[in-house]
Structure formats: C-alpha cells, structure tokens
Amino acid sequence: MALAEKLRSDYDFGHTLDAKHLPRGESSVVGPLVRLFKPFDELVVDFKDFKPEALEKFIEESSIPLVTLFNNDPSNHPFVAKFYNSPNAKAMLFADLSTEGFDLLQSKYREVAEQYKGKGISFLLGDVEASQAAFQYFGVEESQVPLIIIQSDDGKKYFKPNLKADDIAPWVKDFKEGKVAPYVKSEPIPKENNEPVKVVVADTLQDMVFKSGKNVLLEFYAPWCGHCKKLAPILDEVAVHYEKDADVLIAKLDATSNDILDENFDVRGYPTVYFRSANGNITLYEGDRTKEDIVDFIEKNRDKTVHQESLKDEL
C-alpha cells in the first residue's frame, strides 16, 4: 500500500482475490502476484517479488517500452521522460523514419534491445525531425544519420555515425565490453586565437591548460548567460594585464558546446572560474568579479615556471 501511495500519480493500482475480474478474465493465474498492464510490447507482465524496492524497480522498468519512440506525437512524451530519468545507460538511435531501409534498421535495433533487456541499458529510437535539440546537445549533425549514441550512467558518451543495420549488435557488444572509446563533444579548434582571452575547446583542453606549463585562469561560460557577458570585459582587462607575462594564460571555454570530462572541474552554473597553477594545483575562484580581485587571486596562487626560473638565472 505504501508503494501504491508513492506512485499513485503515475499509475492506477487495484487488487483482487479472483483472477476472473482481471481485464482478460483469466482463471489460471496463480497468485499472489503483481500484474502490470501496459499499452505496448507484451501488454501484461507478472512479478512475484513483493519486496518494496524490487517491486518499484519492476514497475518503473516495465512501464518503459522495450524501445521508446521519440517523435512529434505528444502521447510518446511521458515514455521519453521516463527513458531519460532511468538510471540505466541510454542507447539512442537517431534515424529518418521515412527512408528506405528503416524497417530493417528498426528490426535489428529491437533485436539488440531484447538481447540486453534487464541488463542496465535502455533503448530509444529518435526521429530526425523531432531530434534537433538532441543533435545540438550532443554536438552531432544530421549528415551523420543514422547514428547511435550511448550515454553511460557516469555521463560519458559513445558515438557511432552513419551506421548500417548490421553494425548495431556488434557495436553495442563492444560498448558493453569496454572496447569503445568515449566520444567528446568539441567545438572546432580556432584557426586564429589572437584575442587577449584565449579560446579553449574540449580538443585543446589538455594542451592549453594541463600541458602548457603555465598558470591558467579558465572561465567556463554559456553564450546566453548574462553574468558571463558582464564578466567578459573584466577578463579582457585581466588578460591585457598579463599580456607580457608568458607564464600566465587567461582563457575561456563554452561549456554548452564542449564536454568537460575532467573531474577536477565541477561546473554547475555559469560563469564558473578555475585557476590551475603551473605545478597543477587547481582552485575554484570565489572572489569578487573585479579586475583587481582576480589579479590578486592569480598572484597569490601562481607558481614559478621553468621560463621564470631561466630568466632569474640569466639575471
């Protein structure tokens, strides 16, 4: 009863002592059991473990289609929400549902979903037309369709573009066996990077921040963020202040267009500013957003670099 109370906003609960009262009027049902009725897949599922945690998990997992369909039909949206709220790894196949060969692609995908049912991975099929926001979020393009993305429970993403129907099963198998490298969303590396505040993207984060040997102040920002826009001219001033100091780099990274896989950076809002000293000490900046305070913070936390030491020796 406690579980029914907890989930009553999402499910209708009932009980009976006579199986004849069930929608199908079955008299052969042997109880006690919980029967879940649903408008998709096998239509009914039975469960006999009455432990609250196991029962709740059964209800939540069984109330999601084997393959959730993401299209412009509003009736599918509650299932899509449940898919994304699931703690499972999430496999997402994006395709043009109107193209020749789609039926085979869907069939092979469903076979794989059946194979991994109950094994910690959920499956979604997204129509290209309805998935533009997802394309932007993952940093992929329509020209890469059909494509599959798996987002693991630790947030890492795995990506296979322009796949064929027969590619699905072996690729998912390789993912489960840890043989697929994570996909990192990154903006293109700038051809020119001559402004006082240098642009960092995911593909240059290691070289510009971790391997540069410099003291680096790095802002994680969002283009739409008002506070970031106010901070921008102040960071420009800080960067100009250090323009002749080869050991200090002031930089920024668009956190909406680049994945941040390094666990040292905990970015939960914008702007978030971190300082990495030349020796690798990483500190979150929590001071006032003024040129004077930021410069003072850098001076207190910077390390001497090889470049500084060599200049000292020459003098």
Image (cartoon, rainbow, N blue to C red):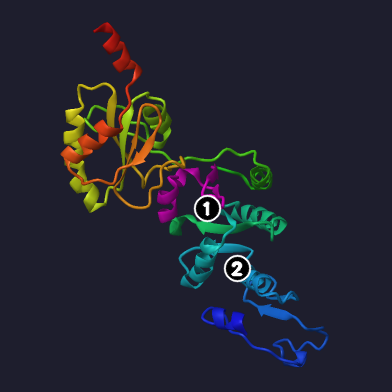
Say which element carries label 2.
loop
- Give left or right: position of 227 versus 183: left
**Residue 24, image x, y percentages:** 73, 86
- Give left or right: position of 279 versus 46: left
Residue 151 covered by magenta stretch: yes
Closer-to-camera residue (126/289): 289
- Disc nearer the start of the sequence (2/1): 2
Q: Is residue 228 visible?
A: yes
Residue 198 covered by magenta stretch: no
Residue 38, by quadrant, is bottom right
Residue at numbered disc 1: 94
**Residue 265, image x, y percentages:** 41, 43
Residue 132, by quadrant, is bottom left
| Amino acid of disc 2 | Ile
Residue contact at pointers 2 and 1, CB within 8 angstroms:
no
Task: Examine the rendered structure and indicate whether residue 69 appears above or below residue 311.
Answer: below
Task: Examine the rendered structure and indicate whether residue 306 appears above or below residue 242.
Answer: above
- Give left or right: position of 111 versus 287: right
Residue at numbered disc 2: 64
What span is in magenta?
132-161
| Amino acid of disc 1 | Phe
